[in-house]
Amino acid sequence: MYDQFKTRAEGVSAEVHRFPTPATALDFIIGFLRDEGVADAPGRRAVWADCPFLASIDREQLAEIKGLHLQVSREQAAEAHVGISQMDWALADTGTLAQDASAIDKRLVSTLPFIHIALVPTAGLNPDMPTWLTQVQPKEMGYLSLITGPSRTADIERVLTIGVHGPERLIIIFVDELGGTH
Amino acid sequence: MQQEFKQSIDKALHNANLTGALGKFSEAYKVNRAKAYEGIDFEELRGRIATLKSFAASHLVELADQFQRNAEARGAKVFRTSDPVKVREYILKVAQDNGVKTVVKSKSMATEEIHLNPYLEKAGIEVGETDLGEWIIQLAGQTPSHMVMPAIHMTKEEVSDLFSKEVEERLTSDIPRLVKVAREQLRPKFLQADMGISGGNMAVAETGSIVLVTNEGNARLVTSLPKIHVALVGIEKLVEKFSDIAPILKALPRSATAQLLTSYVSIITGQTPNSDGSMKDLHIILMDNHRSEMAADPMFKEAMQCIRCASCLNVCPIFRLVGGHVFGKVYTGGIGTILTAWYDELKSSEYIQGLCIQCGACKDVCPAKIDIPGLIMEIRRRLVKDQGVPLLQKSIYSVVNNRRLFHGLLRAASVAGKPFSKGTKFIRHLPLFLADLTDGRSLPAIAAKPFRDVFKTIVQPKNLQEKAVFYGGCLIDFAYPEMGEALVKILNKAGVEVLFPEGQTCCGAPARYNGAYEVAAQNARDNIEALLAEQATYVVSACPTCTVALNHEFITTFESLGQSNIMPRARELAAKTVDFSTLVKKLIEEGRLTLKDGQHLGKITYHDSCHLKRTLHAEQAPRQLLQQAGYELSEMFECDTCCGMGGSYSLKLPEISAPILQRKLKNIKDTGAPLVAMDCPGCVMQIRGGMDQDGAPVRVQHTAELIAAQLKD
């Protein structure tokens, strides 16, 4: 399923990675944020919505990253360069990420910044939409989000253009040993 | 109005940007759509969607009740009304009660339908569209030309002019840069807005959820950032179960934009927290506006199955020439014609329904299995019922139905037109108001002797084992008797005697396609009587439109008019009726007919006639016959796209018919084949006439003529 997911997601311009543990994934993220020039300056900050991943790592490492905020306000999210959140599920046949996004910070960090890093527990992989729909309880999850690739439009002369109102880049990181909320 | 309508067509046809952009898009769409559906059983999928949407259309009140209960249990406020005025008032009241100054909107056709923006703006509220296409047309002061791609009619240069004015800076027409500008301009509007207004792609009764499908991410922002969210949902969007989401989400993005899934899908069930910790003020408006009347109509209930993918626009040979604005201000294209007739009024569709050439391309791709051309025909019928048949048309039908008189008049016109045919088999120019008819296409000269008279001179072998009744139809009878002669020759060879009952008359298609069902029904009765009077195994026709009349449309015409007494006879005729190529292929397979061996007849291309392919599904038989005869088949691009003939369509809207024909001629010539075959004398008339004026050395033949030359002695 992972291979199918990767093919489909890359087909819609997402970038897909996989790590065995939260610690190895964290190393990647720290390197990524450094390369992206994340800093404590307007337009260069990063925001990270609360999630189980944060509970499974050594938070001390995060303190070294200047400009990374774990308390997310809409103002911070609106001017952040990178947003990080944990997704709950993935749908292999379309390369889609799914999330109980009832908590608004999850939507802010995945929509407003230029880059969205999405962490996914590998165990959350589902083959397809019908299977996924049987697992979610909409009455308990007021806002379910499905994300397939970065934001896109073809409204001007049918030319595909990435990054309209949402992120220009979607970085998907599967973590094998990661628990989820659902 | 008629003149205004013709002018809007003329304007669209002369807009090179529009026809260029739409033409390119429609070509790419077909390829991409097919790719998106790879590995999916489309018939099974659309069967499921049709079933679940049809169920919803039969249970609108129950599902709306259930939706309301479930959404309200989760803190939403649900407002139900049939009246667009009340919808506008409700939204304005919510806005005023909460001191709303600015609104951001994600794309919603329902708000277009009720003209919400000007109403709110008049009350002093600033309304900003955020879907890129919608924002472009808002800046341009226009209306959407396409349900999914509202600004498809505009070029990047036009967009850069609009944006330049908006940001007071001269921008180039670099598309990624223009998209950035939109992001920068709209971002503060999202953050400041007091209210977000969205539509809804689905409303799930079982859970009280609304489902929003977008690509840009604007619907996520519209439903997340402002503290108030108003969703306006037409009741045709109701579905019963949460699991019903899956098939619709499988088809909608594939059919709409050839995507496996859009970038974003949001499933919203009740209130969620705002960023300041308060709860979202969520209002869901379920709007009727004639939808339940539509659902109560036994024929139009089917249109409630629409999931608004707009694939009927994308494959329409007319839409790609004229674009959306010719259809009106809100819903466009095939389904748009039907929705306008209901949400507005029947009379509003009076002119636009005439744009449909009845080629059936949209019916083939509709993921909700709606017979769009069939429903447009029904609109025509009801318009004629309300308004009567125009006098001129009436007198034409009385002539058409009198075969001797019809041929006499045509022949007289043809002889009078001698100076125009210059001794060839074509009429190339006609004087005065008839000139349009020969613009880009020559008309066939009328045969001196109609087939009904030629037939009497044909000597058929004695003691043939089986009989077939031949139904000629107007064109073979009056213009192309040689096609009839070819058919007789072939069937005789296979041991079939051909009968040609004199009482046969027009198949009724011209009357039916113009909504004159009473005339068509009389044609049907006359033909049933004439054709069933003879004892024969088959009734065969070499014209697919006639064949469809005999084996489908007589029945549906009687059904529409509630004439059931004749139905058993109509069914008996239908069961016997077969098209030329299917019958000949069968005779060959039975070993009763053999073609010459080892022939190398060179390259040929084949044009699919609309009725043969999409109603009779007989597109393989002629291809197999021609290849068996020794032709090397080279398929043309868009082989099954209409040639623009459409019976009287080419007479009523020659300005649209002509460019469709030009496209067909180019596709034929591009194959390099010196010969093109087809099974319909109407298509022969259109394409042969077009080739004559074009001057290209391509022969245009009916399959019957080509096969008749390759029979083994």
Image (tube, rainbow, N blue to C red):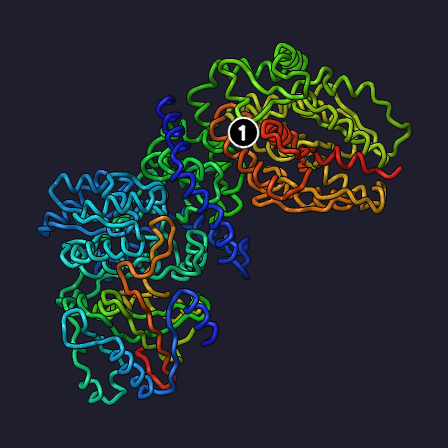
Against B35, residue B343 (above or below) is above
Question: Which residue: 18% across, 39% down?
Answer: B119
Q: Which of B667 and B585 is in front in this view?
A: B667
Residue marked by disc 1: B562
Chain letter for mark 1, please. B
Q: Is residue B564 visible?
A: no
Question: Which residue: 66% across, 46% down?
Answer: B634
Q: Which of B216 and B80 is in front in this view?
A: B216
Against B504, residue B101 (above or below) is below
- Which quadrant of the structure image shows residue B3? top left
Q: Quadrant of the C terminus of chain B?
A: top right
Report whether B535 appears left or right of B233. Answer: right
- The percent position of residue B174, horizontal first and vertical second, equals 30, 53
Q: Which of B404 and A172 is in front in this view?
A: A172
Q: Is residue B435 visible?
A: yes
Label 1 crowd bin: few (<14), some (14–19), many (20+), radius 10 Å: few
- The percent position of residue B353, horizontal first and vertical second, equals 44, 31
Element on which disc 1 rests: loop
- The percent position of residue B401, horizontal first and vertical second, equals 62, 17
